[in-house]
Amino acid sequence: MAEFDLSGKRVFVAGHRGMVGSAIVRRLASEGCEVLTATRAEMDLTDQAAVRAWFAAHKPDVVFLAAAHVGGILANDTYPADFLYLNLMIEANVIHAAHEVGVAKLMFLGSSCIYPKLAPQPIPEDALLTGPLEPTNEWYAVAKIAGIKLCQAYRRQHGCDFISAMPTNLYGTGDNYHPENSHVLPAMIRRFTEAVAAQTPEVTIWGTGTPLREFMHADDCADALVFLTKHYSDEGHVNVGSGQEVSILDLAHLVARATGYTGQIATDPGKPDGTPRKLMDSGTLTAMGWSPNVPLAEGIARTVAEYRAL
Ligand SMILES: NC(=O)C1=CN([C@@H]2O[C@H](COP(=O)(O)OP(=O)(O)OC[C@H]3O[C@@H](n4cnc5c(N)ncnc54)[C@H](OP(=O)(O)O)[C@@H]3O)[C@@H](O)[C@H]2O)C=CC1
Ligand SMILES: C[C@H]1O[C@H](OP(=O)(O)OP(=O)(O)OC[C@H]2O[C@@H](n3cnc4c(=O)[nH]c(N)nc43)[C@H](O)[C@@H]2O)[C@@H](O)[C@@H](O)C1=O
């Protein structure tokens, strides 16, 4: 397949202030393209009229849809209406407006939570819609599955080159460190750093500590997304994983080491574990010649240093 050339293109990054969007903007700096951004005040992506007007005025050639209503396991479980409604609106508005103004390439971001709770491991792309979803994040997953289907439908009906990537659990620069609503890695970095400062003898992590998760640095994810935008053009969504899998308890020990915490680590089985395992089969992506760069321990150390400097 001929490479899709980004140089000279007008590239809109939706969600440029977020962890992944900002990593995409950094990664695009070496592509010779013009990066377009809009703040939420300039264009609320849930507002169809605002999105249509912005696209008509700015006519981007390429779109990275890295804007979404995002959160960890507890936020997903607590605010199901927000996770379903807001994400459906953002995707529908952006994907339709991109079609209306003739965007040449659109990259939609889903998530590994689209797969059934008990999917085969590592999870191949064709496990989608083969079984019941994990209840804590089914609302978000349904919205993300709708986004994949929107891209496929616009490709089939209108010939749009809209593609989808499914990143694994991400962390890195610009993550959300909210104590309850964040994902596990930023939550642990905050909790262990605070415990070191307060000399707390015990830190409690949520759930049993036994679930397995695969982690990828946001810079690796951004690199994979740019790679796919340039080299992939098909209906099927593509998994973006690192192969770096760890149990939640082992992750806590990694974060403890990176923060210098030497106290006890306790678990809280009263909090949800979520899906027991979520390792993706990223063979489609690696067979195309892409591989990640940031080892987990190194990425955690870097992120801890960035958190301390906030
Ligand atoms: N974090 C993770 O572990 C994973 C993330 N992903 C996917 O990657 C993408 C980005 O996630 P991430 O960077 O972590 O999320 P963030 O929460 O860091 O960033 C989300 C971005 O979306 C913007 N946004 C949200 N709602 C609106 C709105 N109504 N109008 C305009 N902008 C809006 C936010 O704007 P503002 O700055 O104004 O808040 C923010 O810039 C999402 O699609 C997510 O599903 C996939 C797998 C794992
Ligand atoms: C990326 C993905 O993120 C979400 O799914 P998740 O993988 O379950 O995400 P999580 O990072 O919040 O938790 C991972 C594991 O870690 C445990 N855990 C321990 N201690 C804390 C803790 O302090 N905070 C959090 N959040 N989890 C903790 C927690 O109990 C769970 O077992 C989806 O909702 C969906 O949004 C999605 O796509």
Image (spheres, helix red, strand yellow):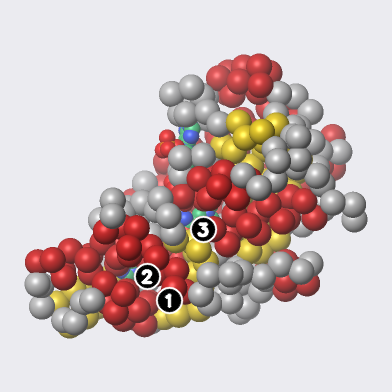
Relative vertical location of residue 243 with respect to residue 84 in this rendering, above or below: below
Which circle, 3 or 2, is nearer the viewer? Answer: 2
Q: Is mark 3 within 8 Å of ligand 1?
A: yes
Circle on res. 297: 1
Relative vertical location of residue 298 with respect to residue 147 in this rendering, above or below: below
Q: Dot 3, crowdedness within 10 Å: few (<14), some or many (≥20)?
A: many
Disc 3 secondary structure class: helix
Q: Quadrant of residue 127?
A: bottom right
Q: Which residue is disc 2 drawn over?
A: 301
- Residue 295 location (% of width, % of height): 51, 75
Q: Are marks 2 and 1 in contact (CB under 8 Å)?
A: yes
Residue in the foreground of this view, choosing between 307 and 210? 307
Three-letter code, disc 1: Ala
Q: Which residue is disc 3 drawn over?
A: 218
> CA gap, disc 3 to disc 1?
14 Å
Whichever of callouts 3 and 2 sits on the residue coming sooner in the sequence is 3
> CA gap, disc 2 to disc 1?
6 Å
Q: Are marks 3 and 1 in contact (CB under 8 Å)?
A: no
> CA gap, disc 3 to disc 2?
14 Å
Three-letter code, disc 3: Ala
- Residue 28 location (% of width, % of height): 63, 45
Relative vertical location of residue 80 with respect to residue 224 in this rendering, above or below: above
Q: Quadrant of residue 13?
A: top right
Q: Dot 1, crowdedness within 10 Å: few (<14), some or many (≥20)?
A: some
